[in-house]
Image (tube, helix red, strand yellow):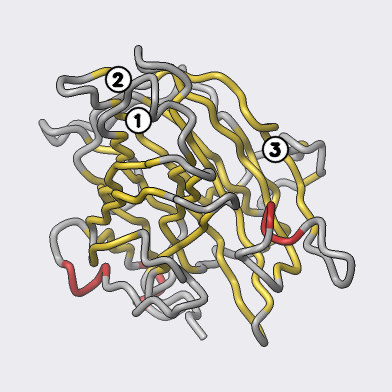
Amino acid sequence: MKIMKKIAAVTIAAAALFAFAGCSEDDDPNEMITGSNKKYEIDYTNTTTVTSRGYHSTAYKHAGAAVQLDFLNVNSDTKEAGVMGLIFDLEEKDGVKSFNVIGVRTADTKGGLGYYVSRFDNVTDIQAENFGTGLAENPAKETEYVKAFAKAQGEKGTDSKVTVYAYAIEEKATENGTDSAKKAYKKDEFIYKVYLINNKVANLDANGKLVDENKNEIDLSDTSPVATIATGYTKLTQNKLAVYANVYKEKTLKGTWTYRGDYKEVGVDED
């Protein structure tokens, strides 16, 4: 066995290992999302009568990540203005995409949130409503793991800011089971566990575990994931990540995404 397959690396400070690909017009046609590397921002007013969508993906592949979502200027006019989220296990072939997504929006001015977790397959038009599940020809397929919109609580800060952390990590199953959509998986297959937490995350360690500002591992043993997702993978499989947003018609959404770290197994195929 090659030694390199035993080496795990987490991108914490080195931006070069967390580089992002350039964004095409199809990814974010209204140029809603700005930023690069580990920090992205949105401050967009949608003056149209249709939802505006955009995403920015990573250049490298990963098996998990933690992203801090900060919703800014949350008030009675901007609550439920749109969704900020994390896309993971993103694959694309011949223009057809498949991915998992956890999407979050503000529900009130006191830190209340709504969220969903879904998988989308056969996405040919990512700008279409619900990623194209309603297209008359060749529609995308959605598998719902948490239906929109389940209730959650973010951390209410100063200046009308609401913060929550989205964390998705690929792990080997220790026993047979079923995921949140009742799909079966076998022991030793890989599954994604998805969390939405208020713990302040500084980064990830070499095993993809959350670490706080004091370099202590954040214990999630008593925290249930909001979703588990069967992958069918028999080995650790890395795919791209992305930050995602949609802004509802005639609404303004302002916020930031901060990647607190990603899990990257060196030596895994990245073709």
Disc 1 residue type?
Answer: Val
Between 271 and 9, the one nearer to me in the picture: 271
Can you name the residue that lies furthest to the left here? 214
Per the image, the residue denoted by label 3 is 145
Q: Position of residue 215 (x, y in %)?
A: 14, 36
Q: Alpha-carbon neighbours of circle 2 within 10 Å: few (<14), some, or many (≥20)?
A: some
As measured in the structure, the alpha-carbon distance from the residue carrying label 3 to the one carrying label 1 is: 19 Å
As measured in the structure, the alpha-carbon distance from the residue carrying label 3 to the one carrying label 2 is: 24 Å
Image height of 92 relative to 69, above or below? below
Task: Indicate which disc, 3 or 1, sits on the residue closer to the N terminus.
Answer: 3
Per the image, the residue denoted by label 1 is 164
Per the image, the residue denoted by label 2 is 155
Quarter of the view holding residue 120:
bottom right
Disc 1 on helix, strand or loop? strand
Q: Position of residue 194 (x, y in %)?
A: 53, 39
As measured in the structure, the alpha-carbon distance from the residue carrying label 1 to the one carrying label 2 is: 6 Å
Disc 2 on helix, strand or loop? strand
